[in-house]
Amino acid sequence: MGRSKSLALCVVMVWALAGLILTGFASAARTSKVVAHGGLVKGHLIAIAQGIAISPKTISFVITSKPAQMVKVDWSVVCDRRLATPTVGDSGQVVASESQEKGGVFSATTPVSRPLPLTIKHPTACIVNVYGTLSEHGTELVKILQN
């Protein structure tokens, strides 16, 4: 193979690799979607984010602050799934969906990122609440993400 053909082949391979890498970054950026975000409530140490994740595969949150410090995190997730066939419940009412809630509280140092549980397999939607209470004054941002 001549030198110019070899160089041309290398250039084509580099461009192809660059295209694959950029495509990977673009698809990675699309997989995580910010469902909600919130900052500090004026005059307080608490930031609140509340949102609805539609047909999520995963749910997570991220809390950042300046300066980095301890934050008390209080979270809740309520997921709902429509039933294929509505049924009659114990009270005699028609039940067209099922839902379940989970929540928790913990403390960590910012930045903190954690997955949250899907309370039902294959939910139609999940309502997510995340509260972050700082230990001292600063700035804070809470983001809820879904994939």
Image: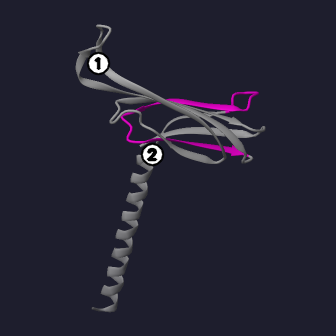
Q: Residue furthest bottom?
A: 2
Residue 132 in view, yes or no: yes
Residue 116, how many percent across, how many down? 49, 39
Q: Is residue 63 magenta?
A: yes
Give the magenta part as a residue range.
Answer: 40-66
Residue 35, how many percent across, how many down? 48, 35
Quarter of the view holding residue 10: bottom left
Residue 141, how many percent across, how many down? 64, 39
Q: Which mark is residue 32?
A: 2
- Type of amino acid under label 1: Ala
Front residue of 56 and 87? 87
Which badge, 2 or 1, is on the more N-terminal residue? 2
Q: Which mark is residue 31?
A: none
Determine whether, in the image, residue 120 is placed left or right of residue 45: left
- The image shows residue 27, relative to residue 118, as above or below, that is below
Q: Secondary structure at mark 2?
A: loop
Q: Which residue is mark 1?
A: 96
- The residue sitting at 45% across, 38% down in the picture is 117
Determine whether, in the image, residue 80 is placed left or right of residue 96: right
- The residue sitting at 41% across, 47% down in the picture is 31
The secondary structure that most of the magenta stretch takes on is strand
Q: Is residue 143 magenta?
A: no
- The image shows residue 6, relative to residue 46, as above or below, that is below
- Type of amino acid under label 2: Ser
Front residue of 18 and 56? 56
Q: Quadrant of the N terminus?
A: bottom left
Q: Secondary structure at mark 1?
A: strand
- The residue sitting at 72% across, 48% down in the picture is 68
Front residue of 71 and 93? 93
Q: Quadrant of the C terminus?
A: top left
Residue 77 in view, yes or no: no
Quarter of the view holding residue 133: top right
